[in-house]
Image (cartoon, rainbow, N blue to C red):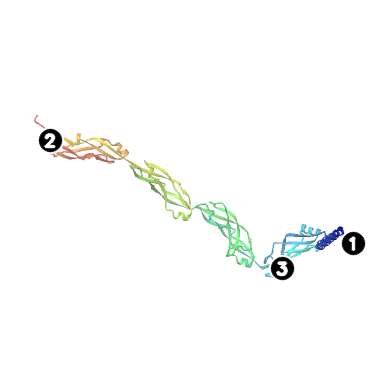
Amino acid sequence: MDKFMESRWFMRIVGLLLAFILYLSVNFDDIQKTANNSNGNSQNAIETIQDVPLEVFYDSENLEVSGLPDTVNVTVEGSKAIVQQAKTLKDFQVYVDLNDIGIGEHQVEILTQNISDKLEVKLDPDFVNISVREKVTEEFTIEPKFNDSILSNGYEAEGLAVDPQTVKVTGSKDEVDRVAYVIATLDLEEEINENVTREARVQVLDREYNKLDVKIDPEMVDVTVSVVNPSKSVPVTIKQKGSLPKGTTLESISVEPKEATIFGRQDVLDKVEELLAEVDLSKIKKDSTITVPLSLQEGLNKVAPEAVKVKVDVSTTEEKNLSGLEVTPEGLADDYEYTIVTPEGGVVDVAMKGQNEEVNKVTKEDFSLALDLSGLEPGEHEVEIDADGPDNIEWTLSHKTVKIEIKEKNTSA
């Protein structure tokens, strides 16, 4: 025996036994649970049934209840078969009974019925804090609204209507007493330039624009916005730009039509007194009729007509000289004779200036140059030329006077 106890195998066996005992002591609870399950409880189960509707029993015609959840979670524990049946069929009821509760604040228990008494049932929540108030219904007028930024440029809202014009608001008296605004807002993404009717949701708000917990009948209404494009007639004014080319004179300038109709927002129309038709005179070299578009400022969207006709009449100045116009002496006594000293040959030149067409028509025959020699005695005289010529141009003679010598005629023959 002493030899066995001192042997290596003895020590190994003792160590193994001690390790087994230590394992049992540490894992005793788990082993016990496993043993219990294997002895008959292996068919038990726990399941949580989510979002079971909560039914409420109360005088719904006269009372308004707030604070109740719509659903609760139900956890059931018991036989696996019964648990599975309850989860699948959901043939039980979760409810609160408020028939005997008066107006005010209350904490109430959520109850179940028609569920197997073989199941252990836990509810989440199992109690709720509620508020019971007197229920009232009042009729309110709806105020239609819309954002005028959806109007196309220059268009205005002529009118805004809603159908029906009133709604019934039902809720606790406290909530209904807080009603300050009942609105239906037309919500559109696209721009509009014509009458539009769309469905809009009714909102009930307090004075701070908080949404109230009330029932609305009807919840949706039709909102109509009537759109107009205001207009007025204004004169068209010519705006001259630049200068006519050298030698060209402006005779007249006119526009047709003299008025145009503009369309746009009324506040912009009120400020517009005229439309400008800009004409660049530096490009005008002859009589012209040009088409000028009419530009619009922000807030206007249309003009009729879109362009006007501007008629520009000009005259072109030309300078021209005619040479060799003869001067004709008149009124000399019969016994005298004359000799023209200057200008040489008794002829003068004329410088003309005027409209091109008129100047080009003038000839020497259009001028009459006379010298009045009546009453003059023999000798040299400076005689002014009595000239007559066209009235529609400017003209100047190269000489205003003629030096003439008068002598007695030689009669000795």
On the image, the x and y values in percent for residue 253 come to: 37, 45
Pick whichever of labels 2 and 1 is earlier in the sequence.
1
Viewer-side residue, 8 vs 166: 8
Q: Amino acid at mark 3?
A: Val
Place residue 34 in its image quadrant.
bottom right
Which secondary structure, mark 1? helix
Quadrant that contains the C terminus: top left
The residue pinned by badge 3 equals: 108
Is residue 240 visible from the viewing direction of this image? Answer: yes
| 319 sits left or right of 255 in the view | left
Quadrant that contains the N terminus: bottom right
Q: Which mark is residue 407?
A: 2
Q: Which mark is residue 383?
A: none
Q: Badge 1 local density, few (<14 within 10 Å), some, or many (20+)?
A: few
Viewer-side residue, 398 vs 42: 42
Q: Which mark is residue 2?
A: 1
| C-alpha distance separating marks 3 and 1 | 79 Å
Q: Amino acid at mark 2?
A: Lys
On the image, the x and y values in percent for residue 216 come to: 63, 61
Which secondary structure, mark 2? strand
Place residue 56 in its image quadrant.
bottom right
Is residue 331 visible from the viewing direction of this image? Answer: no
Which secondary structure, mark 3? strand
